[in-house]
Image (tube, rainbow, N blue to C red):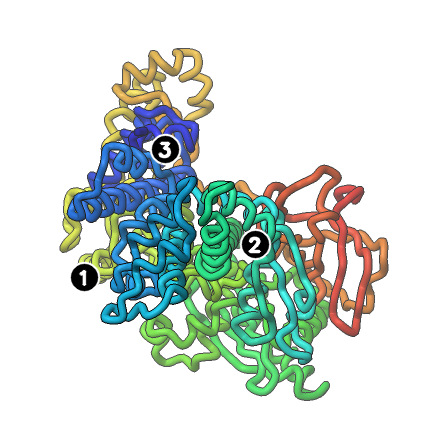
Amino acid sequence: MESITQILARELDKKPEHIENVITLLDEGNTVPFIARYRKELHGGMDDTALRTLVERLEYLRSLQERRDTIKRSIEEQGKLTDELSAAIDEAATLAVLEDIYRPYKPKRRTRATIAKEKGLEPLALQLFAQEKGAPSPEELAAGFIDSEKGVSSVEEALAGASDIIAEMISDDAEIRRILRDFINASGSVVSQAASEADSVYRLYYDFSEKLSRVKGHQILAMNRGEKEGFLKVSVSVDTEACLHLVRRKVTVPGSSSMEFVRAAADDAFDRLIFPSLEREIRSTLTDTASEGAIHNFALNLKPLLMQPPVKGKVTMGLDPGYRNGCKVAVVDATGKVLDTSVVYPTFSEAKKQEAIRKLAALIRKHGVQHIAIGNGTASRETEQMTVELLHMLNGGQSYAIVNEAGASVYSVSKLAADEFPDFDVNLRSAVSIARRLQDPLAELVKIDPMAIGVGQYQHDMPQAKLEETLNGVVEDCVNSVGVDINTASPSLLQRVSGLTKTTAKNIVSYREENGAFTSRKQISKVPKLGPKAFEQCAGFLRIPESAQVLDNTAVHPESYDAAEKLLALCRCDMDEVRNGTLGDLRKVAETIGWEKAAAACAVGVPTLKDIVSELMKPGRDPRDELPPVVLRTDVLDIKDLKPGMVLRGTVRNVIDFGVFVDIGVHQDGLVHISRICDRYIRHPSEVLSVGDIVTVAVVEVDEAKHRISLTMKGVKEQ
């Protein structure tokens, strides 16, 4: 039997020693971000995504092994564990196969077969199932089992009980289940029918059928929801006669006197026991696979959303649009500190709109606002049009951007927001959040439950614990890849740092408030309840711009400071050049010396040395600055302005199974169907596009009544 290390090495196409090293590191309490960044020599350069896949499979394989051990113990206690059975259990690669093997030995609830056994009919069933040539007929055999005291008063009752026992024996046969499972998965279909005549959003599935091997994840999740809400009836359709033939061929002996009896019991086993069980299992597997795909898609969308380039160092106005309660306004300075708040009512009347423009213009002039962030929710279109009119009037170089406000309302009513802004109305907190999302999306979005950010499909239909675990992993990876300024970060941001918890994050902020700004990484170890292991895990991800040690504001881990000093000496450079940004191309110098030779001289591995070089050349760098900048606008389009063939620039807002939604400066995002993304075949839009990508699209079709915009990227030249 393959070991867990061997299985993971084969599945992930990695060296067994790298897999073993990662397992050891995980068992020692190291986090994925720490392992990914600071233990590259041990894992061969796996990124955080590969490591999290490894973690997930490791947990599954370990739970599979635990289940194997439990099953073996159970069968052994029954005195039925043979070497052959033990080997089969060891070779079972999935929980489904393992449970098939265990099925005949699993303690059962009271069934028709167990009742028949209580009546003493098991010997009759075994004789009939043996189907020996020349044996008496079923009726003749059954006559010897009539026993009124046991509740068997006739031949018919005896045969009925024997049939129930044989049916259960056939149902418990792991090989028969495997053959049927494979056949149904290869040839069966999932079928959906309308449960009522009422119209609904599920009308596409009122008469729907698709092969199990081809059905899409989003279709499964949609049908499941439609069934749950009472609009659909969903089932698995199979060639029943072909399935019955497979079972009969495995269990009947042609020419025997009881062949027809066993055949009838086999048919009953399939109809009553096997198929309903396999149908539930197959639908559950389809749902699990669809959920995994949807969770993966959610994670793919979340990462680029969190990693959107910040619009730093600018005074920003946040507008949270609304009808009845007006448009909430917040002005924040370059660091996100609130300077002013207000409420305007641009949708009430033309006079109110002009009053709003005057009021906002006064705030912009007073505080030197350079950018306006507009939430994309209710009344966003009217607010955007008002903003364009405002900018034209000012003509002062200001610009605006539409910001995804998903989750802002969740944040505004949270305890976190109440603690941060105790004197602010709930709606004004949303405006502050929207402004800050433009300035630093990551720092603001970490305050919100990832599931509320809204960049997935059917997130409420997925296993919530698994979804939460995956999304939290994405947030953790993003925060640690960017790094966190320990002297300005909120507890929400700090608790996402490798090695830190809610408690230690709060303790950092308390320590900062009591003792002033941190002036060195060494000082971090003085924070209450932050021990040596936590310090090791978090230190490299925390930045201290105020430190006299320039390396404290880089991703160089304190354990590698000596190596960084040795490298600079080897290259005849010094730390002052790093601090002043006059270092030159250290990479070329290292290449001239030779990476292996330089790494040996510095007592680190080549991957670590290359990371040190990158950090020394750009201390305090933000990896998000290398991404395409946010699209800032000064004008607005109306859906009425769109014409087929019109070419526009836009930002990808959501990536889903069947395409991507693109913000083209109109209130309604346009859809680029997967078939219109590129000229080559792709299985999923995420193969070529991510949330936040800037793309050039052409308008294909506009439906004003339904607010639908169809776009294409095929054959469209970059502008």
Please tell me which residue lies in front, 715 or 19.
Answer: 19
CA separation in Å, label 1 and label 3: 48 Å
The residue beneath circle 1 is: 514
The residue beneath circle 2 is: 217
User: Given this view, does label 1 or label 3 mark the residue nearer the observer?
Assistant: 3
Please tell me which residue lies in front, 341 or 266.
Answer: 266
Please tell me which residue lies in front, 147 or 642.
Answer: 147
Q: How far from the left and from the top, in percent, is residue 38?
A: 31, 33
Q: Is residue 360 visible?
A: yes
Please tell me which residue lies in front, 193 or 589.
Answer: 193
Mark 2 burial class by Cα count in 10 Å: few <14, some 14-19, many 20+: some
Give the answer, above or below, for where 192 lies relative to 681: below
Q: Residue at the location (50% across, 47% down)?
A: 247
Which dot marks residue 8?
3
Q: Earlier in the sequence, mark 1 or mark 3?
A: 3
Q: Is residue 553 visible?
A: no
Q: Residue at the location (66% across, 65% down)?
A: 205
Q: Does residue 102 appear to the left or right of 718 in the view shown? A: left
Q: Residue furthest right?
A: 644
Q: Residue at the location (29% across, 35% down)?
A: 90
The C terminus, quarter of image: top right
Badge 1 marks a residue whose secondary structure is: helix
Q: How far from the left and from the top, in percent, is residue 264?
A: 49, 55
Q: Earlier in the sequence, mark 2 or mark 1?
A: 2
Q: Earlier in the sequence, mark 3 or mark 2?
A: 3
CA separation in Å, label 3 and label 2: 26 Å
Mark 3 burial class by Cα count in 10 Å: few <14, some 14-19, many 20+: many
Q: How far from the left and from the top, in percent, is residue 235?
A: 57, 62
